[in-house]
Image: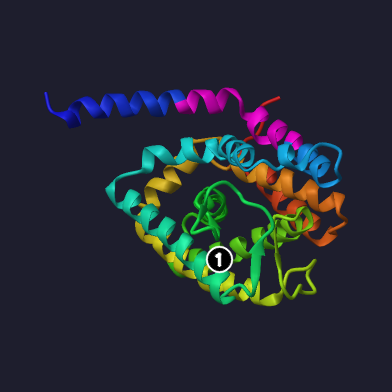
Amino acid sequence: MSETVVARPTRRRVESTLERVVEGNRFTIAVTFPLVGTALLIAGREGLVPAALAMHPYLLIAANLVMVSPLVAGLTPLIDRRALGGLAVLAAFTWGIELVGVLTGLPYGDFSYGLELGPMLFGLVPVGLPVFYFPILLNSYLLVLLFLGGASLPRRFGLTLGIVLVLDLVLDPGAVALGFWGWDDPGAYYGVPAINYLGWLLSGSVAIAVLQLSFDHEAVVERLDDCGFFLDDLVSFLVLWGLINAYFGNWFPVGLSLSLGGALLASDGFDFDVL
């Protein structure tokens, strides 16, 4: 019996188990985890608990892995050789452009990390960076497909890039307030300079192009229709960073979080009736 024949049932069992675990714990993953994470991060920032505990890099990575588990479970059946190759290219691109950014100030401006988010590549950027970057890219792609799955490729591309920018408009102010990273020359948008978003236009365009080439569009749309929890990680993201921004009085990012969350929950294609 060939290894391929043996591997297929094993893969299906793994996919089924992962899907069952995520489906049975949707509220815990998408709501409880980000609520606890928000409280812990703010407590660490305010000195109510040791920052070394609240912002321990491996705790941050582990918590993030739990919150992205719906995305992983939804995506896993779609992973073939082409998709795996595309994700490898995206990981290399993510590390590469972040290293260039830290070393040269381009394309995001002169910035540095305020704490180590796990092991650091060359002591400069987190090895686990794709764990934080991929969800922004993939959730943006899926959200556009949820509403406009049948739209033309150029329209999907442009709207996905727009959502990526919106999610970064939510993320960066909260991350700066927590001290995760910051710019040598802080900008007017909650300490974030405009060049950061010009950089995201560049890097996001390349990443989305790779993503579009890596996955079968029709298969992703079909999976999105069948998998109720596929976008639960986006719920986690909006809960976590919306609340963090609210605590620090960053009201524009809060408004963006509420707008995206409201649109997602109101969509006929998304069901979060888990209570």
Relative to 103, 86 lies left or right? left
| Disc 1 element | helix
**Quadrant, the N terminus:** top left
**Magenta stretch prevailing secondary structure:** helix
Q: Position of residue 260 (x, y in %)?
A: 70, 53
Residue at horizontal 38 percent and vertical 46 percent from the top? 219
| Image quadrant containing the C terminus | top right
Q: Name the residue at 29% across, 52% down.
A: 82
For mark 1, does the 10 Å Cα neighbourhood hold few (<14), some (14 to 19), or many (20 or more) residues? many
Amino acid type at image mark 1:
Leu
Q: Is residue 152 visible?
A: no
Q: Is residue 23 magenta?
A: yes
Q: Relative to 93, does residue 116 appear above or below in the rendering?
A: above
Residue 156 against residue 147 in the figure, above or below: below
Q: Residue at x 71, y 34 (%)?
A: 31
Magenta residues (range): 18-36
Residue 159's spot in the image, x, y percent?
A: 56, 65
- Does 29 lie within the magenta span? yes
Q: Position of residue 222 (x, y in %)?
A: 42, 43
Q: Residue furthest front?
A: 123
**Image position, residue 273 (x, y; %):** 67, 30
Judge whether residue 244 can be spotted in this image: yes
The residue at the point 70 percent across, 55 percent down is: 180
Give the residue at the far left of this rendering: 1
The residue indicated by pointer 1 is: 161
Left/right of residue 28 with respect to residue 80 in the rendered view: right
Q: Coloring scheme of the render?
A: rainbow
Foreground pick, 140 / 207: 207
Q: Is residue 84 above or below residue 2?
A: below
